[in-house]
Image (cartoon, rainbow, N blue to C red):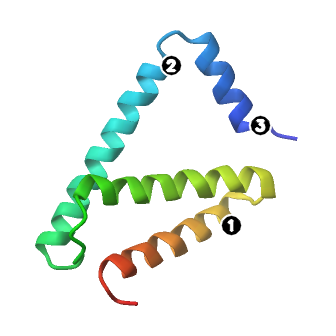
Amino acid sequence: EGTNFFIFMSEAANRISDFLDIHSGQRKKERWAWSEIIGIAKQNKEIKSILPDVDIAMLFLNLSDGIMYNSTFTKKNETEALQELKRDWDNLYNLLANKR
């Protein structure tokens, strides 16, 4: 059996004093990158939502977190998890673009 990701991350947070700051900094970079992408998609009229870019970015990020979290318990392999992630990202994008 592989190492449980969440136990590993919890231990890292407890043992590495800068871990939470590093994680927070990385999350901030991810949020910024997604917000930039969302802003471009709005300018190009791909996304029609009036929600703030950062809120939409968090939807994509939290969706990713949830899929990866769930995949550890359902024992999905990486390929299955990535297929689920792509499907759900596409579905969220289509909702934001008013395509469905």
Where residue 28 is drawn, which disc sits there? Answer: none
Foreground tag (2 vs 1) = 2
Where residue 19 is drawn, which disc sits there? Answer: 2
The single residue placed furthest to the left in the displayed view is 43
Q: Position of residue 1 (x, y in %)?
A: 88, 41
Q: Residues within 10 Å of mark 1 (few under 14, many from 20)?
A: few
Which residue appears at 74% of the width and 59% of the height?
A: 77
Q: In the image, 10: left or right of 99?
A: right
Q: Position of residue 66 (x, y in %)?
A: 59, 54
Which residue appears at 42% of the width and 23% of the height?
A: 22
Work out how far the residue at label 2 is from the one at label 3, CA to CA, in angstroms: 18 Å
Q: What is the secondary structure assignment of the residue under circle 3?
A: loop
Which badge, 2 or 3, is on the more N-terminal residue?
Answer: 3
Q: Position of residue 80 (x, y in %)?
A: 68, 67
Q: What residue did someone put label 3 on? A: 4
Type of amino acid under label 3: Asn
Q: Position of residue 88 (x, y in %)?
A: 52, 72
Which badge, 2 or 1, is on the more N-terminal residue?
Answer: 2
Q: What is the secondary structure assignment of the residue under circle 1?
A: helix
Work out how far the residue at label 3 is from the one at label 1, CA to CA, in angstroms: 18 Å
Type of amino acid under label 2: Phe
Type of amino acid under label 1: Glu
Query: Does residue 32 lie above or below 41 as drawn?
Result: above
Q: What residue did someone put label 1 on? A: 80
Which residue appears at 22% of the width and 78% of the height?
A: 48
**Quadrant of the drawing holding the C terminus:** bottom left
Q: In the image, 47: left or right of 12?
A: left
